[in-house]
Every structure is written in C-alpha cells, then in structure tokens.
Image (spheres, rainbow, N blue to C red):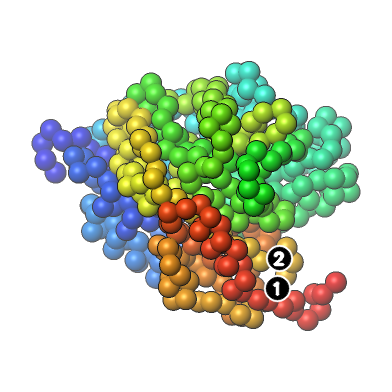
Amino acid sequence: MTEGRRRLLLVDGASGPAPEFYGPRLPPELDLRVVVTPAGSAAAWASRVRALRALAPVDVVDDPACLEEAVERVAREWRADGIAAFSERVVHLASAAARRVGLPANSEAAQRALYDKEAQRLAMVRGGVPCPAFRRVECAADLEPALRAVGLPAVLKPVTGMGSLAVFRVDSPEELRRAYDEGMVQYGRDSRVAGRRPSFLLERELIGQRWHPDPRVGDYVAVDSLVGGGRIAHAAMQDKLPLAHPYRETGHILPSTLPAGRRREVLEMTERCIRSLGVTVAAVQVEIKLTADGPRVLEVNGRCGGAIPNMTYAAGGYNQVAAIARLFVGGVAEGPAELPRFAAYLTPQAPAERVRIERSPGLERLLAIPGVIAVDSVAEVGSEPDWRSGTSANLARVEAAADTWEELVRMYEDLTGLWSWSVPEGEAG
C-alpha cells in the first residue's frame, strides 16, 4: 500500500464479471483490498479465492450473514476511500456499509429503489415517470384485489429477484393463482435468494411495438449507465433478442441498431428514471419496453449488466470496470466515445417443459466458433435444465464479438440448433 493513494474496498460476489476479468482492468492508481464470502461449489470457490488473492489482500467471511458487518469493519480499520461491488448479490450490501462509514453511496431510499420493484415504481410515479398500474401481493388474499386494480394481461414477479426468477404472464384469475403458488415454490428453493419468503408485484403488462427495422430483434432494450460526480454517462444500449416463454432472455447485442431518433427517446427516458430514483453513485441498468406510447421502464437494476463490461471492452476497448471503480472513490461518470464493433451475450434456452439433453456441442466446439470470446455453463448430455429457474437454466452463456450485427444474430440462430432433447418418460403431454 502506497501512502497518499486512494483505497478501494471491493466486495466480491458470485455473479457479474469474474475476478479474472475485472482484476486486470481495475484502476492502477488505486490500492485494493477484497472482502468475500464462500459461494458455489468447493472447486469454484477455491478458484475464485486464488484469483482474488492474486489481485489484492483478501478477507474471507465464512458466515454470509456477517458479511455486511465485516465490510464495514474492514473499511473503517483500513481507512478505505470507497466501497464497490460488481455482483448483484452484494452490491446493495456494499452500498449500505459505505453509507454508514460515510463513503460515497446512495441514500437508503435510492438504494432500496434499485432492488425493490415496488419502491422503484413508487419513486418513478412521484418523479412523473409513466408506469403501468401495479399492486403489491404479500399473500394469497391479496391476489383478487390486486387483479381488480391492475387488470389483464398482467405480469407477476418478485418484488426482489434476479435472473427472471418466478416471473409469470397472467391472462386470467385462475392463471394468477397458479402463478402465485408456483412462484412461491420456485423462489423458496432458489439458492440465489437464500430461500427467503417473497413478496410479489402484480403489474399491467406493457405491450411492445417493433421499433427496429429487423424483425429478429425483440421489443425492448437495455441501457447501462454510470452515475457519479453529478453526471449520468451511458456505457451502452443493447438490443434484446426475443424472449423465450415465459420471460427468459435469449441474448443481447450492443451497440443498439435503433434509429438515432429512437435512441434519443430511450436515453431521455433512462435519465428521467434514474433521476426520479434519486441515484447519485452507481452502475445502473435500465430495461426499456418499446411501446406505441413511447419508451416505458420495465425495471431498474443497481449494477452493471452481468456481461456488459466484457462486451463493451470487446466492442471498443472501453474499460467499464475502471470507470465504475472510480465512481466509488469520488470520481465522475464517464462513458465510451463510441463502440466501433459489435458484441453479444447469447443465452439459448430449452423449451418451457421438463426435458433431458440428448445432444450437446460441448465447451470446445463452442469455443472454436469464429468470434466467440468466452463460454460458460454448457448444458451437457443427460442434464435436465429447469426452465422455471429463469436465466440460470440456459443451454449456454456465450460471449462473442464481430464487425457486424448480422454476424452475431446468425451465430445465435446457429447456436440454437446445436442441442437436442427428449421429454422424459411420463412427462409428455
């Protein structure tokens, strides 16, 4: 540690950019220290700790329930100048600790609005940002009055969730009751939310309209932005491929191919939304539905999209990791001048039923595809991906880059044909 250099305390978590990626891209002018708690398999945890220890001194907190307290203690003892996190699983905890220590952080209300969808919608309404009708559902008795207030078609989703977990389209009262019962089961058994009992939000479904010239693009986009030093800077806007049933993402490509005027509309709505939430320091991803009435906010997440730093780096050498890290030691938000190439995060999905994988390309074949940068989580022969768990059950996660948007869309279309599956005996029909 060098006297006079600013000190950044990183809280690492098992999602978002991997330490092997973000470590070399952290600002060289900062001294670093890491706090982390075990997660995942023993092998994955051992590998992650090795990568972190190659980066900086590491404090391991064995009990996840003690992580926030440990972050605050280390920050005080080490006299940190900022606390940052890239993972959705720990970013809100890092902000809470930073706020108590007096380091750059959002207000408690603003940070809550970045993960609590009801608080988010309420703040947007107060800020004059158009929202669909919505109601909170705490128990089965709330379903009928919520449906009367919201109407159909509607979407039921957890107030606090991730990765499209327990998100359902609802077209009737009977579907709403089934969705609620199934959502309670899914949420309760998912390790990402530690088995907490969920609250749900029922909201009127936003009906999309095609704004892109190419019909292979979905009817929504996402904008990754940085907020800090009184500025909002946009890292990238991504086109989204059409969703797999019910709301599972199949991939996104940046930069967006929306016409310039439409991009301006989306960015203006993004900034209105961020300001309505009172965010002052954060990496933020805003998902925007493209509708006949203009852009409408689907949801806001208080972190960068999981693969976005990798993609912006591949598309134009933009060091989003360094830009985010500097925010939390008092820096000003900065985005890329341009992204001259295209990058994609492709996540083909199995059908929305129980299936067993009979044919899989395997990791090496996927890595051999021209333009592929990295591959994670390949569904192998014999596995049974559970579509109900959302995006965590995709067939693969593929990062790729190319000179044209068309190359990446064709790659996605080719990927979907590399797996085949069967319905286990007794499941058909």
Find numbered disc 1 in the image and state the secondary structure of the residue it sits on: loop
- Residue 295 visible in the picture: yes
Residue 24, given in percent of the width and then of the height, sits at: 26, 52
Find numbered disc 2 in the image and state the secondary structure of the residue it sits on: loop
Mark 1 and 2 residues: CB-CB less than 8 Å, in contact?
Answer: yes
Q: Which mark is residue 344?
A: none
Query: Is label 1 or label 2 in front?
Result: 2
Say which quarter of the image contains residue 132. Answer: top right
Report the front residue among 385 and 34. 385
Q: Residues within 10 Å of mark 2 (few under 14, many from 20)?
A: some
Q: In the drawing, does residue 387 fall left or right of residue 4?
A: right
Residue topped by disc 1: 355
Q: In this view, does 134 lie above or below 210?
A: above
Residue type at numbered disc 1: Val
Say which quarter of the image contains residue 304. Answer: top left
Q: In the drawing, does residue 177 fall left or right of residue 37?
A: right
Q: In which quarter of the image is the C terminus?
A: bottom right
Q: Residue furthest left?
A: 3
Residue type at numbered disc 2: Pro
Q: How crowded is mark 1: few (under 14 residues within 10 Å), some or many (20 or more)?
A: many
Residue topped by disc 2: 351
Q: In the drawing, does residue 137 fall left or right of residue 87?
A: right
